[in-house]
Image (cartoon, helix red, strand yellow):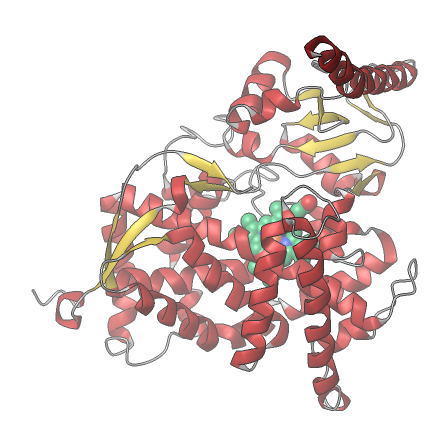
Amino acid sequence: MDNMGSVVIYILVFVPILILGYLTMVKHKRKSQSSAKLPPGSMGWPYIGETLDLYSQNPNVFFATKQKSYGEIFKTHLLGCPSVMLASPEAAKFVLVSQAHLFKPTYPKSKERLIGPSALFFHQGDYHTSLRKLVQGSLSLDAIRNLVPDIEASAISLLDSWDGGRVIDTFHEMKKLSFDVGILAIFGRLDADIKEELKKNYRIIDKGYNSFPTNIPGTKYYNAVSARKRLSKIVSEIIRERKEKWSVEKDLLGGLVNLKDETRALPGEDIATDNIIGMLFAAQDTTASTLTWILKYLSDNPKLLEAVKAEQNAIYESNEGGKLPLTWSQTRNMPLTHRVVLETMRMATIISFTFREAVTDVEYKGYLIPKGWKVMPLFRNIHHNPEFFREPQKFDPSRFEVAPKPNTFMPFGNGVHSCPGNELAKLEMLIFVHHLVTKFRWKVVGPQNGIQYSPFPVPKNGLPASFWKEPSSKRLGCE
Ligand code: HEM
């Protein structure tokens, strides 16, 4: 019976893997008959390729080791896809900017289903251009300057809820702030109960996003799909309520509803929902993870923390000991804190790489990137290359006193799909740091090192920490 069992397992599991592996290899062979050669590298096991190698260790070590062995362009096989990795600024620019039309964005179908097929990230061409114009407009400097008071209120309320020394999961808490700011950017002010409903359903989608995609009731993915449907209804309700207002002024929501997704002929409300969920996804974990790293780097560098405090205390004092609100121009004049934000984004590079797919055979520096292969510009390898950033493992914000060389610093990506929320994310971080360092002291609890992937890199266990509000006399250096 045992032997019989092994044979069945062999037939059910390994035979399909070998067949798929064979077919993939045949496909590669056919492609590599073109005049240019494939980049160096190894493709690993049939079908699974090097996926296990990547996930059984710190992914950064995987990519760094590959770069050491093969140089700045190399091939591998991950998650069932033959891929080419690019670790030089020129190659990243080639894929994301100058020859961006030869590469399309690519995401797993299960993720596209959860976010929604009309969302910005999945598209190229005219539809993407009109959508992007709208989104960029709603996140432009002129638009976000009006959000300062509301972001400030959210940051203060979150920090106040931490007071008293209980241990919090910093990353988890930061997600509350980045969600609130995402909602503000999309809808402006919302009724508390509608916001709560949005949050509740979004949280379920968030939990299912990285789970195994299946339609079996009760699974995380199934629950996420159901929550998505409910979220869609809530958004439709908000749109219905706002329609009267749009006869006078247009906001992001109004613009989205009037947009046409030519390829799908979807109702405007679906386009709006897909893009709202997409923006919340793009805004939440990214900003929360970066905020958590800021806290970690400030804790690890007490002298730097003192200097940041001095910069922020000067603003605090000029605002009559925090009685006056922060102004937009104050947020644009925090040079040291701004450099800390930039250096955090370089060190942590929470989006280590991005994916594209070659829409045709492409030649780059004598190498062939066959049609259908995934292409991955490796931001982290570039950000950690000593040729562009001296002593890359050292946290040193002063390196940003001089602008980095072109295409070497891409925490927000580059080209047509680069992050339209970059200024909003930075504004949120600056406002948060202002209130953190002028009013609170804190202590990181438990292991001080280690990273977890959720899927973005976050300090281990979300950086557990305790916070205490300082008496105002102490804040102003009276003690
Ligand atoms: C520290 C925080 C953030 C980081 C590090 C970040 C990073 C990125 C990166 C690297 C991309 C490009 C991905 C690619 O080329 O494949 C991107 C795209 C995007 N981001 Fe962000 N982001 C952040 C915050 C935000 C915020 C706050 C919003 C909106 C409120 C946002 C909205 C978007 C959208 C909509 C896209 C897709 C753009 C397109 O496809 O045209 N992001 N982000």
Number of numbered discs overlaid on the protein picture: 0
Q: Is residue 65 left or right of residue 402?
A: right
Name which quarter of the figure residue 183 lies in.
bottom right
Residue 276 coordinates in the image, percent (x, y) = 68, 65
The residue positioned farthest toward the left in the image shown: 479
Residue found at x 63% / y 56%: 205
Q: Is residue 307 left or right of residue 51?
A: left
Residue located 85% across and 14% down the image: 22
User: Farthest residue toward the top?
Assistant: 3
Quadrant into which the C terminus falls: bottom left
Asked whether residue 16 appears in the rendered view, the answer is: yes
75 to 179, vertically: above or below: above
**Is residue 374 depicted above or below 301 in this figure?**
above
Where does the image place residue 295, in percent across and percent down from the top left?
35, 50
Residue closest to the eye, 458 or 365: 458
Q: Is residue 189 visible?
A: no
Residue 72, x across and y down, in percent: 64, 22
